[in-house]
Image (tube, grey):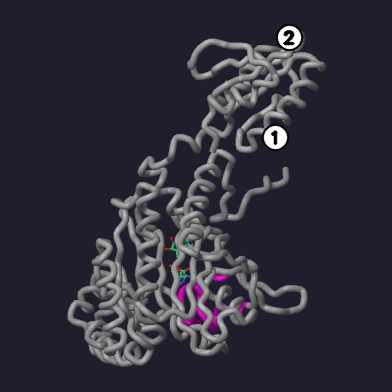
Amino acid sequence: MSKSLQAIRGMNDILPEQTPLWRYFEGTVARLLDNYGYKQIRMPIVEFTELFKRSIGEVTDIVEKEMYTFEDRNGDSLTLRPEGTAACVRAVLEHGITGGGQVQKLWYIGPMFRHERPQKGRYRQFHQIGLEVFNLDGPDIDAELIIMTWRLWGELGIRDAVKLELNSLGTSESRGRYREALVEYLLAHHDKLDEDSQRRLKTNPLRVLDTKNADTQAVLVDAPKMADYLDDESRAHFEGLKARLDAVGIPYVLNPKLVRGLDYYSKTVFEWVTDKLGAQGTVCAGGRYDGLVEQMGGKPTPGVGFAMGIERLVLMLETLEQIPQEISRQVDVYLCAFGEEAELAGLALAERVRNELPNLRLQVNAGAGSFKSQFKKADKSGALYALILGDDEMAQQVVGFKPLRGQGEQQSIAWDALAAHLATCVVQG
Ligand code: HAM
């Protein structure tokens, strides 16, 4: 027997019973971003491999071991995007829309691909909503990004379950000085470091700060602190950000070990974390990348952004039971028609009602069926009301209007009055 076809491990179908919650989440974020004046951009999901190597960094986990890279028929090396920032920078440069200091406030949504070990909250195809701002270098915009996400958590009802961690990596010069001091210190304690950290010490020493190994963590207690190496400009920027968060009343925790897994960051980095999802607790993360555009061949252009993981946030809504009731109902009204004549009249009537109430979720029974079977389908659809068209109703040019969720008796409504009647009983989304 042939092996049954299956989706690739770590790549999930999002089934019809899950999509209402996804759409609610995506719609809530999209509305918020619109309201703050951000514009959507859409990039391809495949790019030249070189793009990610140059932006994310050759010695990051993503580039070293997690990319889906393949040769296309022309022999070009292509990669399924592991994140959105690189492609967004490529796009704004290619189209010249950040030239001459033009401010761009952009957002995107879509699938990203990383060959990680799948587990709850960590997948190989996952979805992000991300945002990038170009040509604003002050802490006010860093603050706006965080304020916006704080509002989002409030709207979603998950604010109490997330915590903001904040750090500043400084400019590349100050980070360079810090790196030297850190390497010198760690080399002096080389034998006490775990194997992975010994390797990182050579390739990407700041990532040693991220270690989960207890012995290495113990060594790090007395290691030089990044904050002591910050240049004046980065320090002022960071103070400016904290003052704004304080002014709005957003709590944060300073985490000097927060370095992020992508190489392009400078100055501000932040993560929103939760303890409600087990090991994969970062739901939204980002920071400033003032050197990236130049590194990719553009003029010096400050940039700052973040991305949130949709799977993780949907899981949080489920875990915290913050699922608005109205999203579970997909149908307002279900029309049952008995006999061919009634079916034709029902179709025309449904279209007339839809003309007048474009937001009404009206489902017309398909596939005919007995009174009992159509009623069963009406009930299962979750509709609040059934409309009934049988011989009697046809003769009188009325429709039976039957509440399905125990709100009163069946009544007869004239065809002409139906839309007006429905408008009074159904709150339309
Ligand atoms: P990142 O931290 O790699 O940053 O990913 C951002 C978010 O995507 C994570 O916090 C997490 O919620 C989600 N995520 C990442 N990997 C997975 C996975 N394997 N499964 C499920 N969810 C995942 C970036 O991607 C940067 N481009 C963010 C950014 C934008 N920085 C500046 N601008």
Q: Position of residue 409 (x, y in %)?
A: 53, 10
Q: What kind of residue is marked 2?
A: Gln
User: Which residue occupies the foreground of this view, 86 or 365?
Assistant: 365
Report crowding for label 1: few under 14, some 14 to 19, many 20 or more residues within 10 A (C-alpha): few
In the image, is residue 68 part of the stretch drawn in magenta?
no
User: Which residue occupies the foreground of this view, 219 or 391?
Assistant: 391
Residue beneath the point at 69% across and 27% down: 364
Residue beneath the point at 57% across and 60% down: 110
Residue beneath the point at 59% across and 48% down: 13
Taking the image as shown, residue 314 lies to the left or right of residue 336, namely: left
Residue beneath the point at 37% across and 79% down: 138
Establish if 409 lies above or below 307. above
Taking the image as shown, residue 270 lies to the left or right of residue 73, namely: left
Image quadrant in which the C terminus is located: top right
Q: Are marks 2 and 1 in contact (CB under 8 Å)?
A: no
- Give the labeled residue for mark 1: 355
User: Which residue occupies the foreground of this view, 210 or 391?
Assistant: 391
In the image, is residue 61 part of the stretch drawn in magenta?
yes
Q: Which residues are magenta?
A: 49-67
Q: What kind of residue is marked 1?
A: Asn
Tally the marks: 2
Establish if 347 lies above or below 131. above
